[in-house]
């Protein structure tokens, strides 16, 4: 049981303190003249004190019950500890011009964005960030649990401008590590997708992977592209498929992760689903589904005790005025 307004409960000790102060400092006395005190004492004994004590106890109980009722006690119908699997993830997407290749429909970039959104939808409580890279790396979205914002920013991803065109895999990994290195999560992951080979940047991909390992970060790598040697890119004609699988495998191996090859949209979605199953860390949280309000019973009992005390005072413990 818990209380919706627990601060009301502080009124109970305050009320009891007032009762004690009144009893100590505000004693009332009255007198009546009788011819023989011993006879009166033998007749009444301690009945008067007992009756007064009963009335006072009933009054205290009634006020206490009413205060508890005001604090809104309620009982959880489902109160259990469950485990939620959480992880810090940085999605690192290649946005070089080759991502416009149409071997994935409608093109590689749109297929990757669609698969990434499905991956995000399956996460629960994870912090996910998004980096895009070509010749340089840009933060599209910092780590967040606001998936609506993340998806909105993911939708806005386009290929790099010509001046940033290229594939700097090492720099991209280093940027992802920089975003995760101060994370307090026990599980930290980079998911890097590229359709080319490292041809830009001042950081070697394997060296960047070793830095990631030092910070306990796994780097899952995905090579996206068909097995065809030539791929058509709108506006650029035909280009070679140059996925550097050896480097992508090496990056994953250094960080104790895995390399995947995506040759179509279906396999790409399957890869994200497999990573979703591989990378999970559990934390224990309390889960509450609904509550049953029970405050009305305390209020009703409070009024019952008030009525009972007044009935006893009026009809059974009659006072002499």
Image: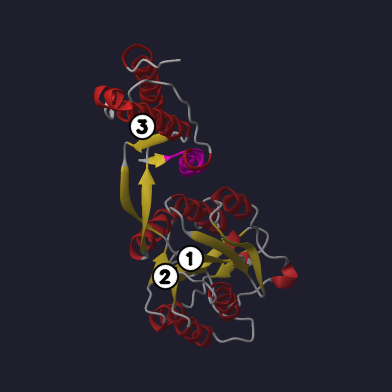
Of callouts 2 and 3, the N-terminal one: 3
Asked if residue 164 can be seen in this view, the reply is: yes
Q: Nearer the viewer, residue 19 or 33?
A: 33
Residue that carries the numbered disc 1 in the rendered image: 88
Residue that carries the numbered disc 2 in the rendered image: 187
Asked if residue 225 can be seen in this view, the reply is: no
Residue 57's disc number: 3
Residue at (37, 73) in percent of width and height = 258
Residue at the far front in the pictured view? 35
Residue at the far right in the pictured view? 163
**Viewer-side label of 1, 3:** 3
Q: Main secondary structure of the magenta part?
A: helix
Magenta range? 3-22
Where is 318 relative to 181, above or below? above
Q: Position of residue 104 (x, y in %)?
A: 50, 56
Q: Quadrant of residue 42?
A: top left
Residue 286's disc number: none
Could you tell me if the residues under marks 1 and 3 are in contact, i.e. CB atoms within 8 Å? no
Q: Position of residue 256 (x, y in %)?
A: 37, 79
Q: Position of residue 55 (x, y in %)?
A: 36, 26
Q: Position of residue 308 (x, y in %)?
A: 34, 19
Q: Secondary structure at mark 3?
A: helix
């Amino acid at each position: 049981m818990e209380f919706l307004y627990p601060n009301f409960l502080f009124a109970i000790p305050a009320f009891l303190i007032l009762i004690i102060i009144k009893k100590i400092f505000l004693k009332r006395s009255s007198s009546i003249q009788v011819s023989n005190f011993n006879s009166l004492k033998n007749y009444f004994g301690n009945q008067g004190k007992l009756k007064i004590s009963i009335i006072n106890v009933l009054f205290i109980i009634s006020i206490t019950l009413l205060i508890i009722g005001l604090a809104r006690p309620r009982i959880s119908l489902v109160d259990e500890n469950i485990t939620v699997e959480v992880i810090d993830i940085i999605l690192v997407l290649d946005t070089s011009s080759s991502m416009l290749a149409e071997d994935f429909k409608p093109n590689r970039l749109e297929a990757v964005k669609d698969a990434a959104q499905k991956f995000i939808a399956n996460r629960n409580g994870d912090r996910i960030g998004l980096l895009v890279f070509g010749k340089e790396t840009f933060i599209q979205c910092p780590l967040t649990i606001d998936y609506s914002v993340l998806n909105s920013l993911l939708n806005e991803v386009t290929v790099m401008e010509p001046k940033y065109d290229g594939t700097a895999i090492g720099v991209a990994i280093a940027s992802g590590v920089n975003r995760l290195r101060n994370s307090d999560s026990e599980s930290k992951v980079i998911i890097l997708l590229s359709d080319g080979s490292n041809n830009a940047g001042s950081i070697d991909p394997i060296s960047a992977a070793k830095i990631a390992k030092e910070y306990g970060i796994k780097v899952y790598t995905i090579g996206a592209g068909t097995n065809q040697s030539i791929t058509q890119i709108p506006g650029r004609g035909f280009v070679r498929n140059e996925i550097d699988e050896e480097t992508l495998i090496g990056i994953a191996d250094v960080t104790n992760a895995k390399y995947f090859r995506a040759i179509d949209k279906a396999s790409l979605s399957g890869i994200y689903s497999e990573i979703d199953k591989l990378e999970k860390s559990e934390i224990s949280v309390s889960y509450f589904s609904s509550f049953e309000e029970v405050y009305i019973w305390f209020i009703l009992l409070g009024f019952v005790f008030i009525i009972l005390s007044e009935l006893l005072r009026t009809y059974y413990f009659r006072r002499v005025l």
